[in-house]
Image (cartoon, grey):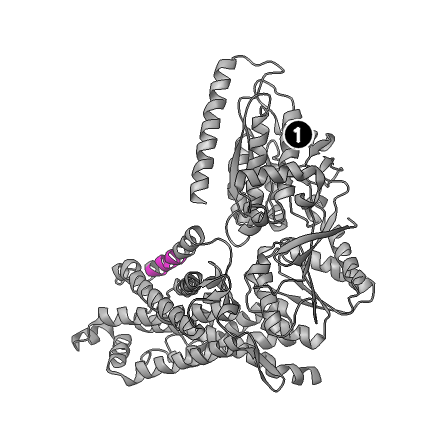
């Protein structure tokens, strides 16, 4: 019990950090599912590309452990570059691999999504690096840990959590408080009816892909800053975890994805910290099974209708 | 990679043509005639997340074949090398091996490098007709040679040698409480088990955790290490997870060489871990189941040749097995060379019997396999991260 009390706060913080990353990626799955009712299995790899774009920025601007530009500026540049790049990548993927199949059998876009996923992985593996690529984070981010009582975490961990939560809130406001958000929700409810109401559905879908992919790109930057390494297969397991988080939360529901992500991260961290790290992943997927048995639509999912 | 694979393809194609030409002009076979065609395969994770250990081994094997062919090949027939990039999965390995199993001129494999791949594909190699032998340069799980397969050979030391040697090293260094970690692979789990048993037998308290391939978030485990109060971390792993792990250890206040010590295993004596971890790995130790050619006098010429072939800084990126890979290729090529040629053909059965009976000359001295296919006297080597290099400290009992 004493062991539990001593370690619980730290493991909770660890879990919230991991969970906020899951949530950020889960949002992309759920956004796209909400609008198109398709699972974009390439989403995890868009996240990976974001990480590599961020690493690319450091490769250009940091040499021999010295950054040519101030640290804050470099981080902002990484974010802008990665979000812009992955946003455009997402739009491109939709245009090439999903739009031609929008009226096809539902399995068809699922298969092309898996194809795009493998394509992106292979592309990075062959043309960028088969081995993990390090980010020289020492050169532009203070490495000292932040302490709160007996809980400590590096600055990059706090950054990961804060930026993720800020983006989630921002996205929530965008979808529920803006005119374009209404158009998105209308498209999600009934694509045909939305067309009759004068909504440019293609544009809504494009913007959705841009936003979802840019969030994943930001996830890649935050991951690269926190762990100082990126590799071409990092999107695979993380993508599956984020997808799990989206399903736990109720796929198609934005707030569900956020909470599902945080829950999954905390659950994993506590299971690893207090039960066994060897079965950490098993607990994550056990949670999925339990949730699906008790609430097949997920914690926050509505059977259909009021999705967004 | 793309460029070099074209070159390899071109080389193989030209060798193939040469072999055909030779066969045509040679006419009828007699006992000493040269073979029509000789192929061997190099198998390992040559690209992907374990490319840092596989790519250097492949270069070593390519160099071994080139050196062998420059000395006349197999009675005048140059050996062509097939490259099987199994991505350390047994499923991919089986697909690749199928082409060798069905082609009787493929006489052996240098590799597979990963224990998990060997254990997942060895039945197919043994059941082939004739069986397809392999000489691995790095698979250390005891089952690789303990399963009674005549095709199985290795030049590296076994886990049951490495586990106790690692445990003994930890105790000799004064370890009081050890965090034992594996990376959930056939290789690393078995090795961590063996080391854990040794520690447990010597009453050293330990805590066991597991990472997984590709893991980068170690915050949960690091908190457990701090809470446990370990003075040594032992991580049985093939390498890719070490850099993010030690980076986060340092961020969390566990500095190697100051308030914690670190012992890694094969793949973790890769010097790129020091740069990838931005120096956090400095001071760490790692053991390896093969010798470092740079530390062995008889291999000095090989190291020079490797640098001449692949560039002055190539050795620092060659990974832990560029010595044993060359050694394994030498062994296989000599066994093929010793096997009789009948009607322009060499039988894999004869290669297997020569692997079992002959003594081979390699860059690390003479090599002879025991009945299981293990090399006699395989040693465990300790490396230490100093500055930007991994320095060989000493050989511990093997």
Q: Position of residue B232 (x, y in %)?
A: 72, 67
Q: Is residue A200 visible?
A: yes
Q: Which residues are magenta?
A: A109-117
- Decide which of A88, B269 is in the foreground and name it: B269
The kind of secondary structure the magenta stretch mainly shows is helix
Residue B40: image quadrant is top right
Q: Position of residue B38 (x, y in %)?
A: 55, 27
Q: Is residue B383 left or right of residue B15?
A: right
- Label 1 secondary element: helix
- In magenta segment, residue A112: yes
Q: Residue at x 37, y 65 (%)?
A: A40
- Decide which of B32, A294 is in the foreground and name it: B32
- In magenta segment, residue B286: no
How many other residues sit within 10 Å of disc 1, few (<14), some (14-19) or many (≥20)?
many
- Mark 1 highlights which residue? B335
Q: Is residue B158 left or right of residue A84?
A: right
Residue B256: image quadrant is bottom right
């Amino acid at each position: 019990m004493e062991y539990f009390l001593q370690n619980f706060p730290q493991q909770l913080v660890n879990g919230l950090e991991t969970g906020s990353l899951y949530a950020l990626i889960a949002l992309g799955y759920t956004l796209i599912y909400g609008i198109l009712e398709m699972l974009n299995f390439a989403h995890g790899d868009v996240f990976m590309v974001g990480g590599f774009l961020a690493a690319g920025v450091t490769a250009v601007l940091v040499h021999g452990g010295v950054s040519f530009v101030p640290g804050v500026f470099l981080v902002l540049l990484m974010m802008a570059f990665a979000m812009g790049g992955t946003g455009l990548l997402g739009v491109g993927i939709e245009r090439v691999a999903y739009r031609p199949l929008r009226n096809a059998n539902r399995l068809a876009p699922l298969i092309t999504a898996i194809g795009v996923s493998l394509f992106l992985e292979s592309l990075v593996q062959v043309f960028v690096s088969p081995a993990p690529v390090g980010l020289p984070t020492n050169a532009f981010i203070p490495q000292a840990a932040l302490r709160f009582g007996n809980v400590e975490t590096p600055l990059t961990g706090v950054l990961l959590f804060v930026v993720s939560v800020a983006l989630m809130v921002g996205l929530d406001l965008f979808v529920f408080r803006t005119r374009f958000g209404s158009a998105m929700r209308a498209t999600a409810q009934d694509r045909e009816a939305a067309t009759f109401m004068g909504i440019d559905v293609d544009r809504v879908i494009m913007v959705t892909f841009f936003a979802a992919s840019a969030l994943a790109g930001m996830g890649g930057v935050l991951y690269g800053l926190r762990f100082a390494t990126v590799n071409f297969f990092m999107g695979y397991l993380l993508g599956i975890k984020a997808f799990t988080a989206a399903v736990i939360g109720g796929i198609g529901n934005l707030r569900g994805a956020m909470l599902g992500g945080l829950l999954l991260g905390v659950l994993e961290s506590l299971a690893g910290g207090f039960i066994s790290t060897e079965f950490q992943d098993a607990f994550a997927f056990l949670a999925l099974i339990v949730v699906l048995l008790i609430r097949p639509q997920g914690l926050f999912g509505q059977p259909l209708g009021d999705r967004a | 990679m793309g460029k070099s694979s074209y070159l390899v393809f071109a080389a193989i194609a030209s060798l193939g043509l040469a072999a055909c030409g030779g066969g045509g002009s040679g006419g009828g076979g007699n006992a000493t005639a040269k073979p029509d065609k000789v192929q061997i395969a190099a198998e390992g994770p040559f690209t992907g997340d374990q490319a840092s250990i596989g790519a250097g081994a492949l270069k070593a094997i390519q160099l071994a074949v080139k050196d062998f062919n420059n000395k006349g090949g197999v009675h005048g027939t140059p050996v062509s090398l097939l490259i099987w990039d199994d991505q350390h999965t047994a499923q991919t390995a089986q697909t690749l091996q199928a082409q060798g199993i069905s082609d009787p001129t493929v006489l052996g494999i240098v590799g597979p490098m990963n224990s998990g791949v060997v254990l997942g594909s060895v039945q197919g190699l043994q059941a082939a007709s004739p069986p397809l032998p392999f000489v691995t340069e790095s698979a250390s799980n005891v089952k690789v040679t303990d399963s009674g397969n005549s095709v199985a050979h290795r030049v590296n030391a076994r886990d049951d040698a490495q586990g106790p040697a690692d445990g003994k090293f930890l105790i000799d260094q004064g370890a009081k409480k050890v965090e034992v970690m594996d990376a959930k692979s056939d290789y690393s789990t078995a090795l961590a088990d063996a080391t854990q048993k040794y520690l447990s037998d010597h009453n050293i308290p330990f805590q066991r955790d597991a990472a997984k391939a590709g893991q980068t978030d170690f915050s949960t485990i690091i908190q457990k290490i701090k809470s446990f109060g370990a003075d040594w971390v032992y991580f049985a792993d093939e390498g890719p997870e070490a850099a993010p792990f030690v980076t986060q250890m340092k961020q969390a206040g566990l500095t190697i060489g100051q308030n914690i010590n670190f012992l890694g295993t094969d793949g973790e004596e890769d010097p790129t871990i020091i740069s990838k971890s931005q120096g956090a790995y400095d001071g760490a130790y790692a053991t390896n189941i093969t010798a470092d050619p740079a530390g062995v006098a008889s291999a000095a010429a090989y190291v020079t040749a490797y640098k001449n072939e692949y560039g002055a800084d190539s050795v620092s990126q060659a990974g832990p097995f560029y010595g044993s890979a060359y050694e394994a290729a030498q062994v296989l090529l000599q066994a093929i060379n010793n096997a009789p040629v009948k009607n322009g053909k060499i039988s894999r059965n004869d290669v297997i019997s020569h692997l079992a009976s002959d003594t081979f000359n390699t860059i690390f001295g003479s090599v002879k396999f025991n009945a299981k296919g293990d090399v006699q006297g395989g040693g465990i080597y300790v490396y230490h991260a100093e500055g930007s290099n991994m320095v060989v400290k000493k050989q511990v009992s093997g």
